Image (cartoon, coloured by chain):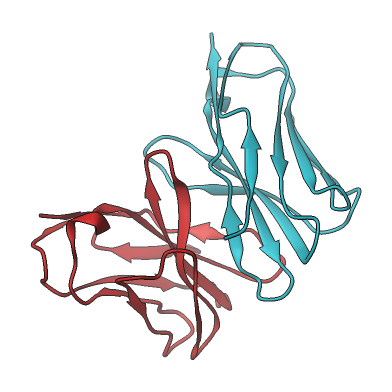
Amino acid sequence: EAQVTQNPRYLITVTGKKLTVTCSQNMNHEYMSWYRQDPGLGLRQIYYSMNVEVTDKGDVPEGYKVSRKEKRNFPLILESPSPNQTSLYFCASGTQGSGYTFGSGTRLTVV
Amino acid sequence: ILNVEQSPQSLHVQEGDSTNFTCSFPSSNFYALHWYRWETAKSPEALFVMTLNGDEKKKGRISATLNTKEGYSYLYIKGSQPEDSATYLCAFMMSSNYKLTFGKGTLLTVNP
């Protein structure tokens, strides 16, 4: 089944403790992207990648890192999470002419 | 940061009503315009991707039009049903870097 798999679905962590949210797609898509969704602010792009080893900042990249060492994986790294990074995170993938396929989301709480 | 505006923010209609929403986006540097449907507690799902000025797309009772010269797209739902209740998102893709920027969405509630 064609899908984008994010893990974990839910995570509660403490300020400053490094964490990684994984994202994997099995559709051979070139494009992958991370978004966060906050009430009243909509989906805001954190980072995106047009292909392996090619990443670029979105609109809210501060406090996040990504890597794209393989086409299928695009992990989101929070080196030192803070409470303002509490949010619902979505990974998505697509090709140049197609709509994005979204993962199921990761609800992160930083206390 | 690109400005992708959607209106109205929310809309309540009765079952059987037809409705439409607007997405406005920059008219320069255009590559594609996406529409998504996002139901509560689920993930956004792609409805349409439009790339050419004058494009019209249709899926069942839902259709969309695109005007790239003036920077707007309309989404139409004919004969709304309660299962159409969702947030409808549009997203603008730039030609220079293929960055996809979303609007804040229109929340549609269809009352039985």
* Residue in view at x 70 percent, y 66 percent: B94
Residue A6: image x %, image y %? 33, 64
Count all numbered tags in the image, as a single digit: 0
Say which quadrant the C terminus of chain A sits in: bottom left
At which x and y percent is residue A9? Answer: 25, 56
Q: Is residue A90 visible?
A: yes
**Percent position of residue A31, x then y:** 56, 74
Residue B59 in view, yes or no: no
Q: Name, please, the residue furthest toward the right.
A: B54
As drawn, A104 above or below B15: below
The quarter of the picture where residue B20 lies is top right
Q: Quadrant of residue B15?
A: top right
Q: Residue at x 10, y 64 (%)?
A: A15
In the image, residue B80 lies at what x, y percent? 65, 19
Report which colour depicts chain B: cyan
Tell me: residue A40, above or below residue A87.
above
- Is residue B54 or residue B46 the one in the foreground? B54
User: Color of chain A here?
Assistant: red
Q: Residue at x 89, y 52 (%)?
A: B69
- Asked if residue B93 is positioned above or below residue B67 in the image, the reply reads below
Residue depicted at 48% across the width and 73% down the height: A26
| Quarter-of-image position of residue A66 | bottom left
Near-viewer residue (A86 or B44): A86
